[in-house]
């Protein structure tokens, strides 16, 4: 059950919630450094080791060092993490534990090479609340509390840190849902909208009118169509090409219980392939950085045999050419379809861990939600670098 509850979309908790649940922490004060997981220029969660082992098709291992944060990065990144808190209450406290730090290492620290990193702690809806919700015994969990914390952190960032710089929003699952609401309510139609380099809202159901690039959740922020485009959105959910989303899949579809009201019309979930933007093609190889021994964003798993007879001793693994992806649409779902190039003569693993497994059974409705970000991490970082350069050039 633990793996099933590792991450969940913000919209999965969009049903009725009890008002004013017991909060383990007072309203956070974002003027205090301890309320941030990442701030520029300090040793914190964004200093996590990002060293990777590149595994070639013939099994050759090459160690890839990480250059580290770029103190002169021309733009900022503002990150909101997914559902990872194991606190026993419906909303988390403001103490950073192992899960919050681990997810930074998996999903955000690598961005510090191209942008100044900002990542607030917030009183998110916890795994405990998600477990209770999914087992039919809901406990008090305040989604508005989580959103309001991030909103307050964003306002503090704008007032004290932004100084007119371009900024990329980065979020996954619950974090992406919160950023979707923040972009719609706090950024669109305001002067800071001009500072939006892009929004990477991953592993969540961003609605757009079917066949169009803008509308739905965002009135004035289109989906990205080019690698040098700014002021646009990258959104996708991922599934294996061999395990397409079933009818009950919670990701890749526009659900009726959206936390953000939608205009009338035929809506579909957005899908933008970041690797495709860089390659200028619909289908392209993914530059993945997968956890070498912990392929999920929380929780340890037995490490796979990344290469026959070889041992990987770095935190991350990259396997060029092993994965490719393209966006696929069905009448009910739109998603990033991920293909593993399993070749008998290839010395590498023939499958990448990432499925939600319960009782030995793959939960097809979750897809590859647990590694949505890792699958395209190299592409996302490269895309932000391109977008940041284009933003600065145009300013």
Image (tube, rainbow, N blue to C red):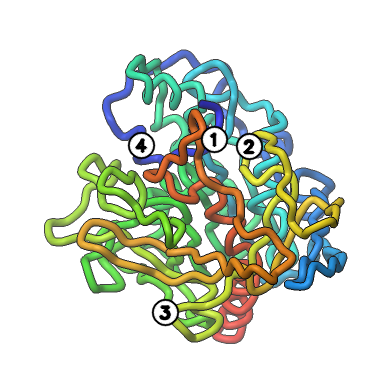
**Residue at 67 percent of width and 55 percent of height:** 290
**Sequence order check: which comes first, mark 4 or mark 2?**
4
Label 1: which secondary element: loop
Do tag 2 and tag 3 residues touch (Cβ < 8 Å)? no
**Sequence order check: which comes first, mark 1 or mark 2?**
1
Is residue 17 found left or right of 114 in the rendered image? left
Q: Is residue 39 above or below residue 299?
A: below
Q: Name the residue that disc number 1 marks.
A: 6
User: Which one is in front in this view, the residue at disc 4 or the one at disc 2?
Assistant: 2
Residue 165 visible, this orientation: no
Q: Residues within 10 Å of mark 2 (few under 14, many from 20)?
A: many
**Sequence order check: which comes first, mark 4 or mark 1?**
1
Do tag 4 and tag 1 residues touch (Cβ < 8 Å)? no
Label 4: which secondary element: helix
**Sequence order check: which comes first, mark 1 or mark 3?**
1
Do tag 1 and tag 2 residues touch (Cβ < 8 Å)? yes
Q: Name the residue that disc number 3 marks.
A: 225
**Residue at 58 percent of width and 51 percent of height:** 79
Q: Name the residue that disc number 4 marks.
A: 12
User: Which one is in front in this view, the residue at disc 1 or the one at disc 3?
Assistant: 1
Q: Nearer the viewer, residue 39 or 85?
A: 85
Query: Residue 149: where, in percent of width, then height?
Result: 51, 36
Q: CA distance from mark 4 to mark 3?
A: 28 Å
Label 3: which secondary element: loop
**Sequence order check: which comes first, mark 4 or mark 3?**
4
Is residue 25 found left or right of 314 in the rendered image? left
Query: Residue 386: where, in percent of width, then height?
Result: 61, 79
Q: CA distance from mark 1 to mark 3?
A: 31 Å
Which labelled disc corresponds to residue 298?
2
Q: CA distance from mark 2 to mark 3?
A: 32 Å
Q: CA distance from mark 4 to mark 1?
A: 13 Å
Quadrant including the C terminus: bottom right
């Amino acid at each position: 059950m633990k793996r099933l509850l590792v991450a969940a979309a913000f919209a999965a908790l969009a049903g009725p919630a009890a008002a004013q649940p017991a909060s383990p922490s007072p309203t956070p004060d974002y003027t205090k450094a301890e309320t941030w997981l990442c701030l520029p220029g300090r040793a914190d969660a964004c200093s996590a080791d990002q060293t990777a082992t590149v595994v070639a098709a013939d099994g050759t291992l090459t160690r890839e060092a990480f250059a580290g944060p770029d103190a002169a990065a021309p733009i900022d990144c503002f990150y909101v993490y997914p559902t990872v808190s194991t606190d026993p209450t419906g909303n988390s406290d403001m103490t950073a534990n192992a899960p919050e730090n681990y997810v930074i290492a998996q999903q955000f620290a690598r961005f510090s090479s191209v942008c100044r990193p900002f990542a607030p702690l917030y009183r998110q809806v916890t795994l405990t609340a998600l477990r209770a919700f999914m087992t039919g015994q809901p406990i008090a969990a305040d989604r508005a509390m989580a959103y309001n914390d991030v909103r307050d952190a964003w306002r503090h960032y704008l007032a004290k840190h932004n100084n007119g710089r371009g900024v990329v929003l980065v979020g996954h699952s619950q974090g992406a849902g919160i950023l979707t609401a923040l972009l719609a309510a706090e950024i669109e139609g305001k002067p800071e909208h001009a500072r939006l380099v892009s929004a990477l809202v991953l592993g969540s159901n961003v609605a757009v009118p079917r066949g169009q690039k803008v509308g739905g959740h965002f009135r004035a922020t289109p989906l990205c169509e080019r690698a040098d485009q700014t002021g646009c959105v990258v959104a996708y959910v991922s599934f294996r090409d061999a395990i397409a989303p079933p009818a009950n899949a919670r990701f890749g579809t526009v659900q009726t219980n959206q936390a953000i009201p939608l205009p009338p019309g035929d809506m579909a979930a957005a899908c933008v392939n970041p690797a495709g933007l860089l390659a200028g093609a619909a289908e392209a190889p993914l530059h993945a950085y997968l956890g070498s021994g912990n392929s999920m964003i929380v929780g340890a798993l037995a490490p796979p045999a990344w290469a026959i007879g070889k041992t990987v001793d770095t935190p991350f693994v990259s396997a060029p050419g092993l994965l490719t992806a393209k966006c696929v649409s069905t009448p009910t779902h739109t998603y990033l379809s991920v293909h593993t190039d399993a070749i008998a003569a290839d010395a590498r693993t023939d499958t990448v861990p990432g499925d939600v497994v319960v009782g030995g059974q793959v939960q097809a409705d979750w897809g590859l939600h647990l590694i949505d970000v890792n699958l395209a991490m190299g592409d996302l970082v490269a895309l932000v670098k391109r977008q940041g350069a284009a933003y600065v050039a145009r300013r």
